[in-house]
Image: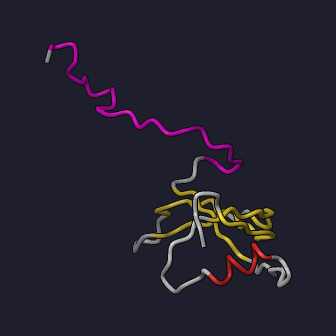
């Protein structure tokens, strides 16, 4: 390591490179997406019946969900000294439609 590479104290040793987040309340520490909703499958649709018949407890499925954003609340977490420890930005999506991903078979 050359002498010029040694931090002088005014520089950060490691600069965290985070993608720019469009948020109107600063720079949150965490971002989350919550899903909610119930989707009524069509009993007469063969693809819907195939999807439902393939459901098994613990089985991983790749699905495509069409959803609408219904909330974007901001939260904060506090440490034991009542100081803000994390700022959280969350979007809640309500599912409106569901299809099985093309590479997943029921």
Q: Quadrant of the N terminus?
A: top left
Would you say 60 lies left or right of 37 here?
Answer: left
- Residues 51 and 7: in front is 51
Judge whether residue 93 is colored magenta: no
Q: Is 19 in the magenta?
A: yes
Q: Position of residue 47 (x, y in %)?
A: 75, 72
Residue 104 percent across, percent down from the top left = 58, 64
Residue name at image x 64 percent, y 69 percent: 34
Residue located farthest toward the front when viewing the structure as drawn: 46
Q: Measured along the vertical axis of the image, is residue 53 above or below residue 36?
A: below
Image-based side of 28 in relation to 5, left or right: right
The foreground one among 49 and 69 is 49
Would you identify the image quadrant in which residue 15 lies?
top left
Q: Which residues are magenta?
A: 2-26
Compared to residue 42, the image places residue 81 above or below, namely above
Q: What colouring style does the render use?
A: secondary structure
Whole-percent x and y of residue 22? 68, 43
Give the main secondary structure of the magenta stretch.
Answer: loop
């Amino acid at each position: 390591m050359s002498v010029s590479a040694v931090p002088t104290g005014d520089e950060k040793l490691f600069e965290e490179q985070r993608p720019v987040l469009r948020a109107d309340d600063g720079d949150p520490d965490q971002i989350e997406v919550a899903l909610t909703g119930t989707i009524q499958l069509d009993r007469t649709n063969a693809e819907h019946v195939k999807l439902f018949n393939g459901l098994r407890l613990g089985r991983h499925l790749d699905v495509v969900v069409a959803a609408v954003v219904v909330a974007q609340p901001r939260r904060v977490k506090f440490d034991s000294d009542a100081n803000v420890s994390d700022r959280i930005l969350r979007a809640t999506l309500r599912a409106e439609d569901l299809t099985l991903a093309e590479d997943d078979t029921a």
